[in-house]
Structures are given as structure tokens and as C-alpha cells.
Image (cartoon, coloured by chain):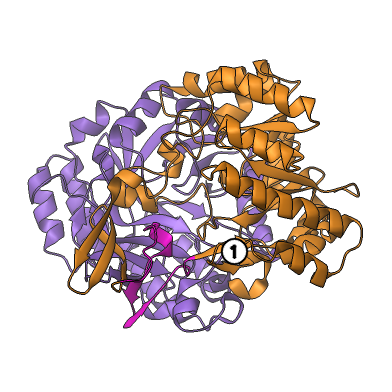
Chain colours: A purple, B orange
Amino acid sequence: MSAIALTLGPVFFHWSPDRLSDFYRRIADEAPIDRVHVGEVVCGKRMPFSDPVWPEIIERLERAGKEVVLSTLAAPATVRERRSIEDLCGDERLVEINDVTALPSRSGKPFVTGPFLNVYNEASARFLIQRGATTICPPVELSLAAVGAMAGACREAEFEIFAFGRLPLALSGRCYHARIHGLHKDSCQFTCEKDPDGLAVDTLDDQQFLAINGVQTLSNQVQAFCPAPADLTSRGVRRIRLSPHTCDMIEVSRTYRALVDEAEDPKAARFILSCLDLPGTLVDGYAHAKPGWQATASI
Amino acid sequence: MTSGRMELVCPAGTPATLRAAVQAGADAVYCGFRDETNARNFPGLNFSGEELAEGVRFAHDHGSKVLVAINTFARVNDVGLWKKAADTAAECGANAIIAADIAVLDHVAKNHKQIRLHLSVQAAAATPEAIRFYADSFGIRRVVLPRVLSVQEIAALNRAIDVETEAFVFGGLCVMIEGRCYLSSYATGKSPNLNGVCSPPEMVSYDDEPNGTAARLSGFTIDRYEPGEPVGYPTLCKGKFKAGGKTSYLFEDPVTLNAGGMIAGLKAAGVTALKIEGRQRGKGYVTEVVRAFRKAVDAVEQGGDAIEIDRILAGQSEGSRQTAGAYSKKWR
């Protein structure tokens, strides 16, 4: 058993029920991942599509020995969205909180704080740990040193670093997929489903820059932070989060498993990841306290 | 909820603008310290402890309040700097501290019970559950509303909570949910949450090229201007980008917020205070905008009609395009 566990974060994109079912079936059967997050976090309007398939997906994952975490919405607004959070918080499984809205109904029971919840320092972390936080995945803009400093000060919780996938950078009340198609959020026609990894946003000079996913803005580049395991364990960081994309996530998870088990070194792991069909180039700036788009390590 | 007179909350980036805002009719001014504890951490801006104490005296002598923004997220292993800022604000006799970070809120709630706590827009509390959590945990008395809610939603929210609400009515407009946007650090390494800055000036370049002037942030082209066309500041979310085969102001046009026409609606929705953005603005600007909004708010309080309010606020556009933002549901 490695000292570092692997987490598969929630799918940020509007995948069809069939795609979700197929994806998690493979994760259950083939991915060397310890913990799997399920549920919609970006847009409550998508929930009626995916809600029917979650029970079967959860059962399948649990039968395969995965720990399932129920992720909750990052920017709830409507009565229905708020009720969904309250319902999920009543579950006996671990729940991921991505907005303070969920805190009152989950306080006193174990939870994960996701990267949408602002935990920037040891005092905030401690406050949340006292209310039930057992795993803390801080905002993506924090460096490994900052996450490690929190982990060092709060040994009673597990700290997790966002290692793979397009970086979740912003949320809005406005839906950009709707806007780009001349529509409004309230009558959006779910055009985001056409972009299962998000829609690339380039600058006027064709620099790859960002990606949109409904109300969410992500990086165009793909975070591929491949630390030596000792860099994590020495700081008390005990979990790595991989964020789902349409590329071969089994291969991604195997690569990270090999990395944390020291079967591959960081350079080899980055090389394997770079060979996959990724939506953007590899970056890891945030982990090194640099601008997020920068790649500090060469392949 | 309130049935009283709406409070006009105005920006003060310097002691001079504080005095200008107070004299122009601000019910309250908000300001921050000269460091990364506040979300407008720009060179030449903000207050020392002594300047704040003097500003508080001046404001109180003229019947105005002072609210101190300590609304960034405290750096790990450095929370003391944020706590000290809160201690100084309390010692200076400020009327309220505006905070977002749980660590700062907790410190104020435990150590400065006499001072009001306002929840900063940076905390992005938009639901009754979130607001009640902050009220129950830290005794917040007011929440500055995230700029994602329509007037109808604000009315519903006010019916469900028992703390005051404050709504932005004029100035810069964030299109992303504030406090949860890392676009700036992605491009530049500096962000509102970490450093109190967005799209920082030291990362901006204007490059004259054959096809016009490119405004860049950290090397990323944010917009391009024809020769002779007025050049704008490359704020990341107001840039022109290519996506899905289209070139557009994808996130937001280069507009500013003007919800002057919604003052009556916001009052009816139960909003206690109206906020003007712009701590980076000079004395002249602040005087003019505060004076106009003072008249507009007074006119609304006296039952003035929409035409009268429009007439009072005409001329407050600085030639820029304006929007009522999320207050109007079709903005989404």
C-alpha cells in the first residue's frame, strides 16, 4: 500500500448518461484508484440527465472496492439545487462540499472540502476539521508548499493536491456556452454537451489559453503535476486528485499509481501523460508557486 | 430586511477620497490597509493605521461610518498579519470589518465582539444556508451580495435571512463569482484571493504592431485596438477571445455596472445598503459619483420616479458602456 492515495475527482463536463456509465464501469474494473467522486458540481440544470444513472454507478464502484464520495454543487442557486445539496449531505457516504451552503447540513459528519471551497490557511482548515472535514483539497492556485504548510499544521486531516486535468479557474452566474450560441442560461439548450472536455478559448493571436464549460472557466492547458512521492509525503500531503477527461483515464491513473509507487520516475510519468490524447499541453506552474499556465518541468 | 432609509456605501482608496466621499454625502465609506489584507492592494492606495484613525474621526464628526475591508484570504503561516489588521481596525474605532476568510471572521468574532462584521462579496455567499452559516458561526450582521443574483432572487433571499444585505450599484463589474476566480493567477501568478490584485499592472504591456495595438497580460493578448482607437486596460475577463469559430468578448463586454435604475427595485427587495465600487478611483470621480448617487437614493426614498432617477444619474458613464449586470435575469 502506497503512502499516497489516488482520488478521481468529479466529472466537470456535461457527459451523457451513457458516457458516464461506460466511463465509471471502466474505472471500477480497471483503474488503480482508491476513491472516486461522483455527481454534478458545475451546473444544476444538468442534474435531471445524470441523476438516474448515479445509483447504478455507485453500486458498481463500491462492488469494485472503491470508496465513493458524493460531490455537491459548487454554485447552488435554485431551491431545487439547494435541496439536492441537503439531500446528499444526509447520505452515510462521504460527501464533498464545494460551497458553504452545504456546511450546516453536513457539520458533525465527515466531509471532503473540494477545490471550490476557499481553504487558504491552517486556521480555516482547522475550523472546518472541527466541523467534520477529513480530507481537504485546497483551491488549485495554492502551491505544494502552501498545501504542505497547512498539512503540517493540521495533521488530523488528509490534504489532497489537484494533480491532473484542466484546472477549474472560475465560476460565473452567466453560462458562456449559452452566450456564445446567442442564448441565455435559462434557455441554454445544453450546448455544453458538445464539448466533453470543454470548449477551447484562444487569444486573438491564437495562443491557447482557457476553456469554457457552461458557467465554468478552466485552463486550456492540462495540469500534470508529477512530484516525486517523497515531495508529498515529507510535507504530509497524502492524496493526489485526478480530474476526468475523455482521454484514457485508466492510463492516467496507472501512470500516477506507478509514480506514487515509485515504479516510474516523474520524468517518465510526464512523458507517458504527454503521449495521451489530451485537450492541452502539460503545465504544473501552480504547484511551484508560479503562474498556473507555466510548465516548470520538462518532459 | 429593512424598511429604513437605504445606506450609501462609498469607496475610499486614500484619506483624501475618504474626506471627499463623506463630504459628497456617503453614509459610509469603505477602505483597506496598505498591504495584501485587502482586495485592492495597489501601489499608492490604502491606509496606514494612523491614517485610518484620522479618517474614522473625520467620518464620525460628519455623521458617516467607516467600514474596513480585510477581505483577502490569509496566507498560510501568516494569518497573524490579517488578525493584526483586524485588531488595528477595531482600535481605530471603525464601525465594521468586511471579511471573507473563515480565519479572519473567526478572529474578529472571538476578539472584537463590539465591532460589526460584514461578509465580503469575496465570500460568495448567495444562498440562505450559506449566509445563515456565517451568521450563526460568526455573528455577521450584513452580507455583501455576490454579483450573480437577480433583483427577484435578492428579494427571495432577504425573506429567508435575518441579516442585512448590501448590493453593488456602480463601478467595475466582475463577471466571475468573486472570491472564486483564479484567472488572474493562472496568467500572472497574482490573484485577488492571494494578493488582493487582479490582472496586475506590472504584467501589462501595450505593443504597437502593424495590425494595431495589442494589450497583453503576462504575454497573453487580451484585446487589440485599431490605430487611433482608444486603448483599454487588459482585464482578463473583459478580453476579446476566439472560441467555437467566433471572435467575441466571450465573458463580458468592456462594460461597467450601473444599476442606478434599479435602486427602487433593490429597496423593494429589502436591500439595506448600496455599494459603489472604485477604491482605485481619484477624489474628483468619487465626489461626482457619490453626489449623483446621494441625490438618486434620496429621490428614491422620497418616491421619485424612474425618469427623475435616470436624469440624476445621466452623465455617470464616463463614455463607457454600462450594464445592469445580473440584476436583470437576461444577463445570464
Residue B94 shows in the view? no
The quadrant of the rendering that contains the N terminus of chain A is top left
Residue located beneath label 1 in the image? B317
Please report, as a chain letter, where disc 1 is located.
B
Residue A155 shows in the view? yes
Nearest the viewer among A128 and B12 is B12
Element at label 1 = loop
Determine the residue positioned at 40% across, 55% down. A169
Is A236 covered by the magenta stretch? no
Q: Does residue A168 lie above or below B314 as drawn?
A: above
The percent position of residue B61, horizontal first and vertical second, equals: 78, 25
Nearest the viewer among B218 and A58 is B218
Relative side of B184 to B83, left or right: left
* Extent of the magenta region: B228-254
Q: Does residue B189 lie above or below B105 as drawn?
A: below
Nearest the viewer among A7 and B209 is B209
The percent position of residue B40, horizontal first and vertical second, equals: 49, 40
Relative side of B209 to B266, left or right: left
Relative side of B153 to B211, left or right: right
Q: Does residue A247 lie above or below B270 as drawn?
A: below
Q: Amino acid at mark 1?
A: Ser
Q: Does residue B156 lie above or below A264 as drawn?
A: below
The image quarter containing residue A4 is: top left
Say few, some or many: other residues with alpha carbon within 10 Å of mark 1 (under 14 / 14 to 19 / 20 or more): some
The percent position of residue B245, horizontal first and vertical second, equals: 31, 83
Relative side of A198 to A248, left or right: right
